[in-house]
Amino acid sequence: MKNILIIGATGQIGSELTMSLRGIYGNEHVVCGYIKGAEPKGELMESGPAEICDVTNPQMIAEVVKKYSIDTIYNLAALLSVVAESNPMLAWKIGIDGLWNVLEVARENGCAVFTPSSIGSFGPSTPAVQTPQDTVQRPRTIYGVSKVTTELLSDYYFNKYGVDTRAVRFPGLISYVALPGGGTTDYAVDIYYSAVKGEKFICPIAEGTYMDMMYMPDALNACVQLMEADPTKLVHRNAFNIASMSFAPEQIFAAIKEHKPNFEMEYQVDALKQSIASSWPDSLDDSCAREEWGWNPSYDLKSMTTHMLQQLEKKFQA
Ligand code: AKB
């Protein structure tokens, strides 16, 4: 049985991952780690243990790990790409100084660690179409710089100390449960909210800009499947390309319009978001994840759109 700590458990991924892991391993075995100002609420708070656990405070992490005999840490604390550009030093402090803290506690206490990377770890000199698993990573954003460092430092701790570090490169994640905050791919969530509210969507990303995206249930499965994978099969560790769909704004708009024929969209391109989006791959080659641990997503743009709209409509009716 695993005892799991999720750092950053009240964020977009964390709030759903915590509930999903509680469903698999048992409520008492999954600790929701949060910071002051981002307290868990409702089911997240009530269904299992919750502790203040600031990634920038190594003693705090060590105390929680010891108190609950933690053997696996999901380190989800990070600033997303757009917001990180307005505070690069804070992005580094959380993303990299925080990662050192987590890896040191993991080394001392024998924990496995999952710290996600992103499509943001690639840059303008990376092959953009079917981006290979092992390729050029020279990002221009501080988010990307910290994600490449995350991959390298996590591999370093595995090779030098045997810490069981594993991760994926997340595409833009789309969910009806919690909103993302400060990412370049957020438009692909916001567009569904506009459609359900009956509002015109103002798109900050230019027509023809492709990025990889994924529906949250597939992203959650990737976390669990990779952390449960047979280590002898893993050639790579930090971090695997995973993919399920790639689209440009006009394609997600068209998919929504099939359900909502009166839906309207207008482009008002945001210069910062566009420059980041243009520097990221159009689509990833995820064959290593498929071969090494059986990655096989369930949702494409069509099935995700049907499910997203149904779920958001229920949410707004309630
Ligand atoms: C962002 O847009 O910053 C994130 C990501 C793709 O890592 N969603």
Image: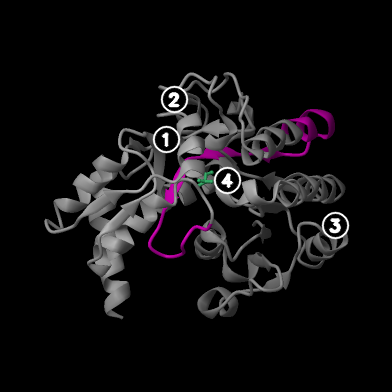
Name the residue tied to disc 4: 81
**Residue at the spot 39% in from the left edge and 44% down from the top edge:** 269
Q: Left or right: 15 with respect to 71? A: left
* Contact between labelled residues 1 and 2, with CB atoms less than 8 Å apart: yes
Q: Residue 130, image x and y in percent?
A: 41, 22
Above or below, comparing residue 96 to residue 5 in the picture = above
What number is the disc on residue 58?
3
Q: Left or right: 90 with respect to 84? A: right
> How far separated are the C-alphas under marks 1 and 4?
19 Å
Q: Does the residue labelled 4 lie within 8 Å of ligand 1?
A: yes
Give the mark nearer the N terminus: 1 vs 4. Answer: 4
- The local crowd at label 2, few if under 14, some if 14 to 19, many if 20 or more residues have their Cα within 10 Å, is some
* Contact between labelled residues 2 and 3, with CB atoms less than 8 Å apart: no
Amino acid type of the residue tagged 1 in the rendering: Ala
Q: Considering depth in this image, is 314 or 20 the residue closer to the camera?
A: 314
* Contact between labelled residues 4 and 2, with CB atoms less than 8 Å apart: no
What number is the disc on residue 243?
1
